Image (cartoon, rainbow, N blue to C red):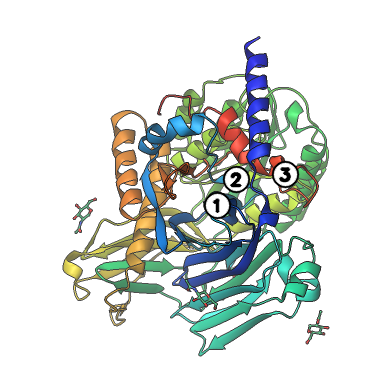
């Protein structure tokens, strides 16, 4: 009964949305610019678009763009009729309370929603008088993460119609020197193959530009009458030195990028824990087998490994870790090929067994790693999530990292994320798709080559540091630490890294080197890198805590989000508009929220494109009590 009423209400809301939907034929996009500046791996991207209402009456004009999930929106502005309307970042609860009324009437649907694997959609609209113009300007910021030896900056272009004046400009400044740079993505194929130009200046700077003509915007791959629709992905890496790495200071803050490369690999002990419960049936279990067989091929002869599958019981290939000899690998592959889906999910017993195997196998000068792959929640054995987390933490006792791979969207990703973070690892989502085996293999490659363990970074003469201890450092990745200099004094600042390499303790320090400092007065970028990293890490910490400690961490994360105007899961952007119009309240979706599928163009009715808005009403966002 109750659900029928809800459904009818929802249908009514959907209908209202369809009727009220802005019609993009009513407007003309004069220009659309995407400008991105990357300095020391910190990317600040500004999207500006000038749009005119071409009708003889006031019309609602929409601005809809996609930005990387990892980024924080930091600014939004509309310029109409000589007047600026600035978005204001507020505490989420406060924004919610203030505007719940308008939102609950279904008059305002602004929010950021998750799209595809890596993007979020930002959407707002404003009413513009006949033949008047509006300029939208959105800024977002992100610290690029080094994976498998490279950084990737993703730029998504989808202005919704061909644009006379369309430009993408990317400026990269890396004082360490740009080692290589290339551009990939859908917008670099077909007729657009040669439209992206990269200019390098003395290795420290690169400028990439992409100015496709209106015709090119219609005929490129994936593009059509509605113009561009695709990505440019700028891929690059910087030069590395063999010691302390790249340290930059500015305005009392520093950021340190540490990624030594010329170290020997440390042999590893790895245990794979593979979920074979009934829900893995079909393609998932098939892809898991394929990935596992590939991964087994990549183990080195001095690695040791173990393999467990589980449903409501545990199945060992061997009860203890064995050396990755040809013979053992062959036998493990045979075991992997025979993995079948069946039964329930006992995550607790499986992870404890994996930890037991690694604990029984201490080996001087090696690095241990536990990898769990699952596609569901614990359904048998111990199923209380907190009890599992506590058991796992006790069993691992900070001795090695636990990586959790959540396959698909039936997993409780937050549970996996929390469990990984509590054990020095990370969680990664594996998307159910034709390339799932490659995603699995890709993740494994990131941790396949440990170069250092027990990494401790110290910075005499500094304070308010981001995370400084790391259980392992892998080839192709990077450790980033930021902090504040005491009294803005570079002279007393002494960075040092201590870590265990293969069988020896190494101290990385460089007493002769002077830290590079940029003294431009207005350059607060290093400070923003510090703020970005601090907020990201506080949000991760908050996830692991409870009670008053959680509140304290959350409060600090909120304070910094507000101070630096970041739209994080704790804040919202309130988009102010001309008098008489509804205010939009934009939230960042929670990590793990199911994304809208990226739909083929022109297929589904337009209301489907507003899946995010739909979920806003259907979900619990406005009805649940504040957490
Ligand atoms: C963005 O790039 C365009 C074209 O290169 C330029 O005209 C414009 O001033 C830039 N805008 C910003 C905000 O940097
Ligand atoms: C792009 O440039 C390459 C090399 O200059 C050329 O071989 C290729 O045909 C060009 N592609 C297009 C679509 O113009
Ligand atoms: C680390 O990666 C670099 C670049 O891919 C490679 O040249 C080097 O051999 C790798 N080091 C080890 C120990 O595998
Ligand atoms: C460190 O941060 C705290 C607030 O979190 C601030 O009160 C303090 O001034 C900062 N320390 C320095 C040396 O700036």
Label 1: how many residues lie within 10 Å, few (<14), some (14-19) or many (20+)? many
From the viewer's perspective, tell me whether residue 224 is left or right of residue 47. right
Up-down: is 265 above or below 110? below
User: Mark 1 or 3, which is nearer the eye?
Assistant: 3
The residue that mark 2 highlights is 114
Q: Position of residue 301 (x, y in %)?
A: 67, 58
As drawn, the label of residue 619 is none
The residue that mark 1 highlights is 69
Marks 2 and 3, the one that precedes in the sequence:
2
Q: In the rendered image, is residue 468 in sight?
A: no
Residues at circles 2 and 1 in contact by the CB criterion of under 8 Å: yes
Q: In the rendered image, is residue 473 in sight?
A: yes
Q: Residue furthest bottom?
A: 202
Label 3: how many residues lie within 10 Å, few (<14), some (14-19) or many (20+)? few
Up-down: is 503 above or below 200? above
What is the C-alpha distance between the residues marked 2 and 3?
17 Å
What is the C-alpha distance between the residues marked 2 and 1?
8 Å
Residues at circles 1 and 3 in contact by the CB criterion of under 8 Å: no
Question: SS class of the residue under badge 2?
Answer: strand
The residue that mark 3 highlights is 606
Question: SS class of the residue under badge 3?
Answer: helix
Front in this rendered view, residue 405 or 223 = 223
Q: Position of residue 445 (x, y in %)?
A: 64, 57
Q: Residue furthest top?
A: 1
């Amino acid at each position: 009964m109750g659900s029928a009423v809800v459904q009818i209400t929802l249908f009514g809301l959907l209908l209202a949305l369809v009727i009220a939907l802005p019609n993009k034929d009513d407007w003309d996009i004069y220009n659309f610019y995407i400008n991105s500046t990357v300095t020391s791996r910190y990317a600040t991207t500004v999207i500006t678009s000038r749009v005119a209402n071409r009708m003889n009456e006031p019309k609602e004009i929409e601005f809809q763009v996609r930005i990387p999930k990892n980024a924080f929106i930091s600014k939004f502005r509309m310029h109409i009729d000589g007047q600026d309307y600035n978005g204001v970042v507020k505490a989420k609860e406060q924004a919610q309370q203030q505007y719940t009324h308008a939102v609950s009437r279904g008059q305002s649907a602004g929010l950021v929603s998750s799209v595809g694997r890596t993007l979020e959609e930002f959407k707002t609209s404003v009413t513009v008088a006949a033949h008047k113009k509006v300029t939208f300007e959105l800024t977002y910021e992100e610290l690029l993460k080094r994976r498998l030896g490279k950084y990737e900056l993703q730029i998504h272009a989808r202005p919704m119609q061909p644009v006379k004046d369309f430009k993408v400009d990317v400026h990269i400044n890396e004082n360490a020197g740009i080692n290589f740079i290339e551009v990939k993505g859908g917008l670099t194929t077909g007729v657009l193959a040669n439209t992206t130009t990269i200019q390098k200046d003395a290795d420290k700077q690169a400028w990439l530009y992409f100015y496709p003509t209106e015709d090119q915007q219609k005929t490129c791959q994936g593009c059509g009458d509605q113009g561009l629709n695709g990505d440019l992905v700028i891929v690059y890496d910087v030069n590395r030195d063999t010691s302390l790495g790249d340290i930059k200071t500015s305005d009392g803050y520093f950021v340190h990028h540490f990624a030594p490369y010329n170290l020997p690999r440390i042999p590893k002990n790895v245990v794979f824990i593979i979920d074979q419960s009934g829900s893995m049936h079909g393609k998932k279990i098939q892809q898991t087998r394929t990935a596992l067989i590939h991964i087994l091929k990549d183990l080195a002869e001095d690695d040791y490994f173990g393999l467990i599958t589980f449903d409501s019981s545990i199945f060992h290939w061997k009860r203890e870790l064995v050396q990755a000899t040809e013979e053992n690998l062959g036998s493990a592959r045979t075991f992997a090929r025979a993995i079948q889906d069946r039964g329930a999910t006992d995550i607790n017993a499986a992870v404890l067994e994996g930890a037991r195997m690694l604990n029984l196998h201490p080996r001087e000068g090696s690095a241990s790693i536990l990898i769990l792959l699952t596609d569901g929640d614990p359904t048998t054995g111990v199923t209380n999530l907190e009890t599992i987390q506590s058991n796992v933490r006790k069993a691992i006792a900070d001795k090695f990292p636990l990586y959790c791979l959540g396959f698909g969207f039936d997993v409780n990703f937050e549970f996996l994320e929390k469990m990984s973070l509590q054990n020095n690892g990370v969680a990664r989502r594996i998307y159910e798709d034709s390339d799932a085996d490659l995603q699995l293999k890709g993740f494994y490659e990131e941790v396949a080559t440990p170069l250092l363990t027990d990494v401790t970074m110290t910075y005499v003469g500094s304070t308010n540091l981001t995370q400084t201890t790391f259980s392992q450092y892998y080839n192709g990745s990077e450790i980033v630490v930021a902090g504040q200099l005491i009294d803005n004094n570079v002279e007393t600042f002494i960075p040092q890294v201590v870590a265990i390499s293969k069988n020896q303790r190494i101290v990385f320090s460089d007493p002769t080197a002077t830290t590079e400092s940029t003294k431009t007065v207005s350059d607060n970028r290093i400070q923003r890198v510090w703020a970005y990293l601090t907020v990201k890490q506080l949000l991760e910490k908050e996830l692991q805590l409870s009670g008053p400690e959680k509140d304290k961490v959350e409060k600090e994360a909120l304070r910094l989000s507000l101070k630096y105007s970041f739209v994080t899961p704790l804040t919202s952007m309130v988009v102010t508009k001309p008098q008489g119009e509804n205010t939009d309240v934009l939230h960042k979706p929670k990590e793990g929220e199911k994304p809208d599928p990226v739909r083929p163009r022109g297929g589904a009715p337009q209301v489907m494109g507003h899946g995010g808005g739909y979920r806003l009403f259907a979900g619990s966002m406005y009805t649940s009590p504040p957490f």
